[in-house]
Structures are given as C-alpha cells and as structure tokens.
Image (cartoon, rainbow, N blue to C red):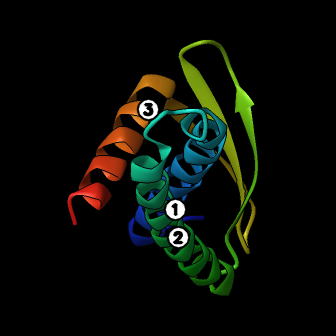
Amino acid sequence: MINPEQRQLLHKFLLLELAVKSLQIDYPQVEQFKMKEVFLPIMDSLLKTLRHEYFELKRQLGQQRIRVVGWTNVDEYFSDVQVATAGDDVVLRYANQALKTQVEELLISHQNK
C-alpha cells in the first residue's frame, strides 16, 4: 500500500515524467523556429533541471520499492497508472485534463525560477 507521503512523491514523479516527455516531443518543432537560438537554450536548461529532479525522485521511490509499471488510457478523459509496491500492485486513476494542467503549471513554475 502507498501512504500519503509516497503518493505525493509518486504524483510529482508522474508530472515530471510527463513534462520531460512533452518537452522532448516539442523539441524538434522548436528546432525549426527562426529564433531557435533564443528558445533552445531555455528548453535545454529546463530539460536538464526536470531530468535531474525526475531521476532523484525515481531513486527515492526505488528505495521505497515503488515503481511505475505502466500507463493505460481508459478513455479520452482518464488514464490508469499501474504502480508496483513492496506489498502489492496499485492502480491509480488520473484525469487527463488535470494532469495536462498540472504539467503546464510545473513547467511555468520551473521557467520562472
């Protein structure tokens, strides 16, 4: 079972994973910008910071024997995340739009640092 503190770490981990994936998907489009010299260093710095936090949280969760097994789209509105713990597997349901909004807020907050 996952306690509230572990669930909070897991949630932040999932947001970081989605943020990194989103930036990696958007990176090739930014490379096509006329002003790519302005935007690429910003994205590189942001990706570096997010990856560092992602791997740090992954390490912390690993020490607690928690790992994400996979994502499953339930429908256009919800996704399930299967999480393996020391005791048993847990399935957490997330609203896709809420995740998207939280990832955007995470990226904006990191950009303003």
| Mark-to-mark CA distance, 1 and 3 | 21 Å
Front in this rendered view, residue 51 or 62: 51
> Could you say where residue 109 lies in the image, as x and y percent from the top left?
25, 55
Q: Residue at x 74, y 32 (%)?
A: 72
Would you name the residue on which mark 1 appears? 44
Q: Residues within 10 Å of mark 1 (few under 14, many from 20)?
A: some
Nearer-N-terminus badge (3/2): 2
**What amino acid type is highlighted by mark number 2?**
Lys
Q: Secondary structure at mark 1?
A: helix
The amino acid type found where label 1 is placed reads: Asp
Residue picked out by circle 3: 100
Which numbered disc covers residue 27? none
Q: In this figure, which residue is indicated by the disc labeled 2? A: 48
Residue at 54%, 76% in the rendered image: 52
Q: Residue furthest top?
A: 76
Q: Tell me which amino acid carries mark 3.
A: Lys
27 or 31, nearer to the observer: 31
